[in-house]
């Protein structure tokens, strides 16, 4: 499973990435990578960050999710 967090320039994006790291650890999957390059973010069709991509599919945009919310998204795709 590959998890990518998009955005890292604002507090919400940083928190979203930190929550994704904890959620991935809790679910026993590899730590998410973070993408902050705007061209790469746009290549996913994302216009608002923070965002989360799991296995190439955008699953959340425009809001920071809690650890529990991200864990649920991960478990739904396991």
Image (spheres, helix red, strand yellow):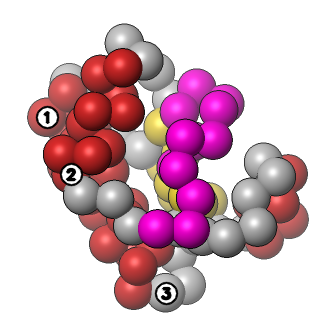
Q: Measured from the top left, where is residue 4 in percent x and y?
A: 53, 45
Q: Measure how far apart labels 3 and 2 are at the Cα level.
A: 18 Å
User: Residue 8, relative to residue 68: is it above or below?
Assistant: below
Q: Measured from the top left, where is residue 10 in percent x and y?
A: 49, 87
Q: Is residue 44 left or right of residue 13?
A: right
Residue at x-position 66% and y-position 30%: 56
Q: Is residue 42 visible?
A: yes
Residue under label 1: 26
Question: Would you call the spot at circle 1 few (<14 residues within 10 Å), some (14-19), or many (20 or more)?
Answer: few
Q: Measure how far apart labels 2 and 1 are at the Cα level.
A: 9 Å
Query: Which numbered disc flags the more N-terminal residue, 2 or 1?
Result: 1
Residue extending furthest toward the bottom = 10
- Magenta span contains residue 19: no
- Closer to the camera, 40 or 68? 68
Q: Measure how far apart labels 1 and 3 are at the Cα level.
A: 25 Å
- Closer to the camera, 39 or 52? 52
Name the disc covering residue 13, or none. Answer: none
Residue under label 2: 67
Residue extending furthest toward the top = 78
Q: Are marks 3 and 2 in contact (CB under 8 Å)?
A: no
Secondary structure of residue under mark 3: loop
Q: Is residue 17 left or right of residue 36?
A: left
Q: Measured from the top left, where is residue 73 in percent x and y?
A: 37, 33
Secondary structure of residue under mark 1: helix
Residue at x-position 20% and y-position 24%: 28
Secondary structure of residue under mark 2: helix
How many callouts does the rendering have? 3
- Magenta span contains residue 56: yes
Residue at x-position 18% and y-position 45%: 68
Residue interval drawn in magenta: 52-63
Residue under label 3: 10
Q: Nearer the viewer, mark 3 or mark 2?
A: 2
């Amino acid at each position: 499973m590959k998890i990518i967090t998009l955005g890292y320039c604002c507090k919400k994006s940083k928190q979203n990435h930190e929550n994704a790291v904890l959620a991935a650890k809790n679910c026993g999957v590899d730590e998410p990578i973070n993408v902050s390059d705007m061209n790469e973010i746009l290549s996913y069709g994302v216009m608002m960050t923070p965002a989360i991509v799991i296995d190439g599919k955008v699953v959340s945009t425009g809001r920071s999710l809690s650890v529990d919310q991200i864990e649920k998204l991960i478990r739904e795709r396991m």
